[in-house]
Image: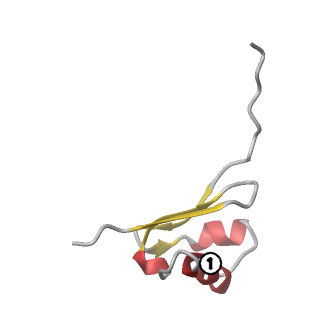
Amino acid sequence: MNIKGEYSGLPYDLVIDGVIQEDNLNKISKDKEWLKKQVKKFDMEPEDALIATINGKGEFFCQRKESK
């Protein structure tokens, strides 16, 4: 079954527990304003995110922190 999956590149963590990972933003040539627009699509701000990532295909994922 010589099945090969499609390689999507390394994912970059852009927000971890509400903290913007500026080094990773720089690696993908994006800025905080771009990040805020992406996170806003999930109806939140970066500081509300548990995690926000982007993969090599440009697919963005964001998950909200749990409410206390």
Quadrant in which the N terminus appears: top right
Q: Decide: is 36 above or below 18.
A: below
Badge 1 local density, few (<14 within 10 Å), some, or many (20+)?
some
In percent of the image, x 69 and y 72: which residue is there? 26
Does residue 29 appear left or right of residue 40 in this picture? Answer: right
Q: Decide: is 3 above or below 20.
A: above
* Along the viewing direction, whichever of 10 and 26 lies nearer the viewer: 10
Quadrant of residue 47 within the rendered picture: bottom left
Total residue callouts:
1
Q: Residue furthest bottom?
A: 33
Does residue 36 appear left or right of residue 19 in this picture? Answer: right
Residue type, mark 1 in image: Leu
Residue 41, how many percent across, how many down? Answer: 59, 78
Quadrant of residue 25 within the rendered picture: bottom right
In percent of the image, x 56 and y 81: which residue is there? 40
In percent of the image, x 27 and y 72: which residue is there? 67
In percent of the image, x 72 and y 76: which residue is there? 30
Label 1, secondary structure: give it. helix
Q: Residue furthest left?
A: 68
Residue 11, how many percent across, how many down? Answer: 64, 53
- Residue beneath disc 1: 35
Q: Residue furthest top?
A: 1
Does residue 68 appear left or right of residue 37 in this picture? Answer: left
Residue 2, how many percent across, how many down? Answer: 78, 16
Quadrant in which the C terminus appears: bottom left
Residue 3, how many percent across, how many down? Answer: 76, 22
Scheme of image coloration: secondary structure
